[in-house]
Amino acid sequence: MSKRDLLLEIGIEEMPARFINKAIRELGQKIEEWFQENKISFQEVNLFSTPRRLAVLVKEVAESQNDTEEELKGPAKKILFDGEGNWSKAAIGFAKSNGLSVDDLYFKDIKGVEYAHANKFIKGVETSKLLPQLSNLITSLHFPNSMRWGSQNVRFIRPIRWLIALFGNETIPIEIACVKSGNITQGHRFLGEVIPILAPVDYERVLLGQYVLVNYEERKAAIVEQIRRLEEEQNWDVPIENDLLEEVTNLVEYPTVFFGAFNKNFLNLPEEVLITSMKSHQRYFPVKNKNGELLPYFVAVRNGDHRHIETVAKGNEKVLRARLSDADFFYKEDQKIPINQSLTKLESIIYHEKIGTLAEKVNRIRKITEEIGKMLSLTNQELKVADRAAEICKFDLVSNMVNEFPELQGVMGEKYAHLQGELPGVAKAIYEHYKPKHAEDSIPSTTIGSMVSMADKLDSIISSFAIGLIPTGSQDPYALRRQAAGVIQILFEKEWSISLSGLLKKVIVIEKGNDNDELYKQLQVFFKLRIQHLLEEKGIRYDLIEAVLAGDFNSVKDIVDRADTLQDKKEQTSFKGTIESLSRVLNIAGKAQPGVEINPALFENEYEEKLYGQWKELETIFESKVTSNDLFEAISSLESVISAYFDHTMVMADQDEIKQNRLAQMLKLAELIGKYASVNVIVVK
């Protein structure tokens, strides 16, 4: 069977760089799945993208669908013949509806009943007749923000300007938003021309001649290569952050690297200000010497060739000079404002209309920080330092610099706090309390920074839950899941033995003024999910995670330790017997009446007395500070005692008083075991 290549190109107005990679991956996946669903064979799918186009090249596509043969099941045999043994209307109808004759029917026995069957040959449809369906895949692409243009009802990330749909040298008829497909593409907006693509295999070569490098990876590699060559020529070090590199790659079609300079007096600004001005606002790469010191140069990428590159460099220098002049002015003006004056301004900034101002949020952060400090047994001096850090942790939000560069919140707070004579630990905590900002970010390095970070995040979460702003599905506009994960990450990595349940209850009182069981239950579920994700990342088995999360909801360290212990013990030969024995106690304890106290005077045999003694001893062990492994060993030692108990004791005795006493003993023991883990959900083989 002959094969042809397929080329699909969507030409659009420049789309935002941050959407391009996701969009082309989604388009490639949709097309690949479409070919598979339609049983059309192909060799591979190649993806291309620039700011002005999304393109897919599918190699060696079959001319038609694969032929198939399908076995059809029809009515039961008894209704396929009339009284004279002739084919009935039902038989004729079944055969005719499938393009067959009654001679093609045969019978198969299914559970004692014979049913008509037939084999139907389905010839594959020609691929070219099916390809117009690809227009539906294009319009089904999902973007965070879409638009309509003109009088069109189609929504897309940007207006579609041209379409190519080539199957070999045949144009596949597709129309989207009044744009009809053809074989015409557009080169670079300023350096290229409108030009035909005569065959899909020519796509990359033709566009390269029109100053368009359509392969994303090759475009990125070209940028890196040019930067490295410039480094070598100038004896520089140009740090290349992947996020910036990806963005720049998706901003250009034909990359040419150049460099510019700025006044060295601007180096008196904090390095973070200079780098943010260059990277976040201008998409420039900062330049350092071999000792890691910032130099008064920048590296940028032009969307074009080397012609008039000096003029381009001067234009970029002018733009950066204006930005850095603004930053220098803001930096000097901010230093004139006392911290306490900035704190007063927080009183007029609404954090949330139902929650209050930023000043009120800061007051709650101070109270939560104090509670955390007490749980960590900090000294009065340490608590005083922590309180000052919490008090001024948000003061830089009203600074000129953070207003201009929001990504510098915390960074400028630390700088300004140092300049105004705050303690180093206080200044550091202002910067660190925003950490971790994302899953890959590190936690605060200092105790005070960690405390204020947790306090800020807990306040955001619990104040939001209190007014009904609870994340649902993919909706989490206030990033509460990320903040909760940050709290868990800090508690886990710091190995603080802080009771999470106790902390949540204290914060609820701070937020609401009283206890709120319903709010606590919602928060408990929310934080347990974050711990579940942590345990999953550690490779803990699903049933062991469920078991420990049903246990004591105390410190994160304790929960993780219990999960680790069960993960280590599960392969031991004794594990199965231990879990089955303990599970037996938990299962029968469910029949006990709450509130019944154990009465040793009602014991009828030594096995009840021995189990009672073991329970009292285990209760003492739980109250002492022992490791998770020691606790498991103590619980495991009950196996033989429990087995002997059940061998010689009928829990569900005829005499109700005896029965309730034995059930009470099961319940008390189950409560202790359950603090460690709900062992009856553990799968043992």
Image (cartoon, rainbow, N blue to C red):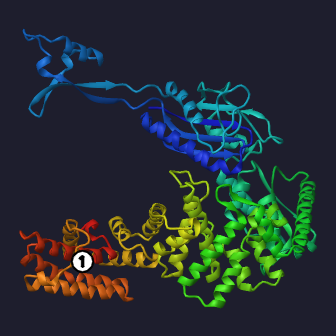
Q: Amino acid at mark 1?
A: Leu
Q: Is residue 685 in view from this perspective? A: no
**Along the line of sight, the residue nearer the viewer: 631 or 521:** 521
Question: Residue 261: percent from the left, percent from the top?
Answer: 90, 66
Question: Residue 503: percent from the left, percent from the top?
Answer: 51, 74
**Along the line of sight, the residue nearer the viewer: 83 or 532:** 532
**Taking 370 as reference, is 617 left or right?**
left
Q: Quadrant of the N terminus?
A: top left
**Taking 30 as reference, is 73 left or right?**
left
Residue at 18% in and 68% down: 588
Q: Which quarter of the picture shows residue 188?
A: top right
Q: Label 1, on which residue?
A: 669
Question: Residue 606: percent from the left, percent from the top?
Answer: 9, 86
**Along the line of sight, the residue nearer the viewer: 365 or 146:** 365
Q: Would you place residue 290 above or below residue 155 in this image?
A: below
Dot 1: what SS?
A: helix
**Taking 411 as reference, is 120 left or right?**
left
**Taking 10 as reference, is 625 left or right?**
left
Q: Which quarter of the picture shows residue 633?
A: bottom left
Q: Would you place residue 353 above or below residue 585 in this image?
A: above
Q: Quadrant of the C terminus?
A: bottom left
The residue carrying pointer 1 sits among few (fewer than 14), some (14 to 19) or many (20 or more) residues within 10 Å by Cα, namely many
Residue at 60% in and 74% down: 368
Q: Which quarter of the picture shows residue 680?
A: bottom left
Q: Is residue 566 in view from this perspective? A: yes
Question: Residue 557: percent from the left, percent from the top?
Answer: 45, 78
Residue at 28% in and 68% down: 682
Q: Would you place residue 481 above or below residue 232 in this image?
A: above
